[in-house]
Structures are given as structure tokens and as C-alpha cells.
Image (spheres, rainbow, N blue to C red):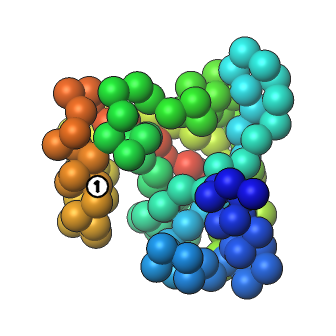
Amino acid sequence: MNFNETIINEFRSNDGTVTTAGFGRSLVLVHHVGAKSGAERVTPLVAIPTDADTWLIAASAAGSDHHPAWFHNLLAHPETVIETPDDGTVAVRAERLDGDARDEAWARFTAQSDGFKGYEEKTDRVIPVVALTRR
């Protein structure tokens, strides 16, 4: 079992609480459909709620020089669902943030975790931020 599968299983077994790597209740499980393959996938991601209907996720890919596959998948298929610790399964629409909205959202991630600051330092790309808004 890979790391993501372990996290997904722990999330689902413990009502959204993940003690592995100290995630606690900070994750959502993002369902997405492959932009090219059409395959359905689930990816655990740190999410920052901005209100009762919106969660921010960052396409950091741990500082890789390439955007993660899930990011491309959400751009291709923005209507999806997430599993949350508090609201269960929620239908959402994904929207890439740009300009000041992106910068303000990214600042929330770097304020929350030094890990995100480190990811930013490892890459020359601007790390995208996606808003997931309840449909």
C-alpha cells in the first residue's frame, strides 16, 4: 500500500482524522477524473477552509518543477466531489485562483506550514491554488 492509500484509509476509518504525519483534521479527499485517461482517482490534500462552502488546496507537488496530475485533472473536469472531516461528501466546483486572489490564498498555506514555504523555495514555478466551492 502506498502513502496516499494509507492516508485515505486512515481518513475514512477515523471520520476524517489522520494522525499519520500529524495531519489531524486538515485533509480533504479530492476525487478527480484523469484528463487523458478518464480514470477516477482520489488524492488526499491539505485544505484550508475559508468559509462553510469553500476549501483551498495548493498544487505544490512537494516543490516539484511540474504541477501534480490532480491539478490538470481538475482543470479538465472541475465539477467533482470531496470528502471532508466535518461535512462528509460534498459536491464542489474547482477554480484556479489567479493574481491577488492566488497570492492571498497561497499566503494562508505558508502561514500554516513551513513545509509549504520549503516547497516554494524548491521550485521556480508559481504554485497554483485551487478553490473548491460547494455546488
The residue nearer to you, when weighing 127 against 66, is 66
> Along the horizontal axis of the image, is 124 left or right of 34?
left
Q: Residue drawn 69% across and 65% down?
A: 6
Residue 28, position as x, y percentages in the image: 61, 62
Q: Which residue of the protein is positioned furthest toward the top in this rendering?
A: 36
The answer to whether residue 97 is seen in the rendering is no
The residue nearer to you, when weighing 79 against 10, is 10
Residue 3, position as x, y percentages in the image: 62, 58
Q: Is residue 59 above or below residue 22?
A: above
Residue 32, position as x, y percentages in the image: 71, 39
Q: Which residue in the structure is indicated by mark 1?
A: 116
Residue 92, position as x, y percentages in the image: 67, 49
Q: Is residue 95 above or below residue 47?
A: above
Q: Residue drawn 71% across and 75% down?
A: 10
Q: Is residue 130 above or below residue 115?
A: above
Badge 1 amino acid: Phe
The answer to whether residue 127 is seen in the rendering is yes
Q: Which residue of the protein is positioned furthest toward the left in this rendering?
A: 121
- SS at badge 1: helix
The residue nearer to you, when weighing 23 against 48, is 23
Q: Residue drawn 75% across and 57% down?
A: 1
Q: Quadrant of residue 27?
A: bottom right
Q: Quadrant of residue 89?
A: bottom right
> Along the horizontal axis of the image, is 89 left or right of 77?
right
Q: Is residue 66 above or below residue 115?
A: above
Q: Which residue of the protein is positioned furthest toward the front in this rendering?
A: 1
Crowdedness of circle 1 by 10 Å Cα count: few (<14), some, many (20+)? many
